[in-house]
């Protein structure tokens, strides 16, 4: 199943009731956190 950022933003809007611009900020922040966590965990491996 493919899930796009736009679909995630739309789901946040519909289920939580945040405006689209706020929902988009949340999704971008979440993806950046995931990315940085994955990058830092790669550095920790021997």
Image: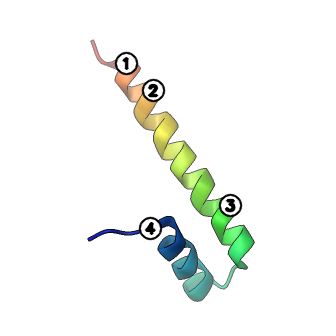
Earlier residue among tags 3 and 4 = 4
Can you identify the residue that label 1 sits on? 44
Can you identify the residue that label 2 sits on? 40
Give how far across and how far down residue 2 sits, in percent.
Answer: 32, 68
Give residue 1's quadrant in the image: bottom left
Whole-angstrom CA distance, mark 3 to mark 1, is 29 Å
Give residue 12's quadrant in the image: bottom right
Give how far across and how far down residue 35 sits, in percent.
Answer: 48, 40
| Residue pictured at 56% horizontal, 45% vertical | 32
- Secondary structure at numbered mark 2: helix
17 to 41, vertically: above or below: below
Can you identify the residue that label 3 sits on? 25
Taking depth in this image into account, of 4 and 22 the one nearest to the observer is 4
Earlier residue among tags 3 and 2 = 3
Q: Are marks 3 and 1 in contact (CB under 8 Å)?
A: no
Whole-angstrom CA distance, mark 3 to mark 4, is 15 Å
Query: In front of the other: label 3 or label 4?
Result: 4
Can you identify the residue that label 4 sits on? 4
């Amino acid at each position: 199943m493919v899930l796009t950022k736009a679909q995630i933003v739309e789901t946040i809007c519909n289920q939580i009731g945040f405006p689209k611009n706020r929902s988009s900020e949340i999704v971008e922040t979440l993806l950046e956190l995931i990315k940085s966590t994955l990058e830092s965990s790669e550095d920790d491996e021997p």
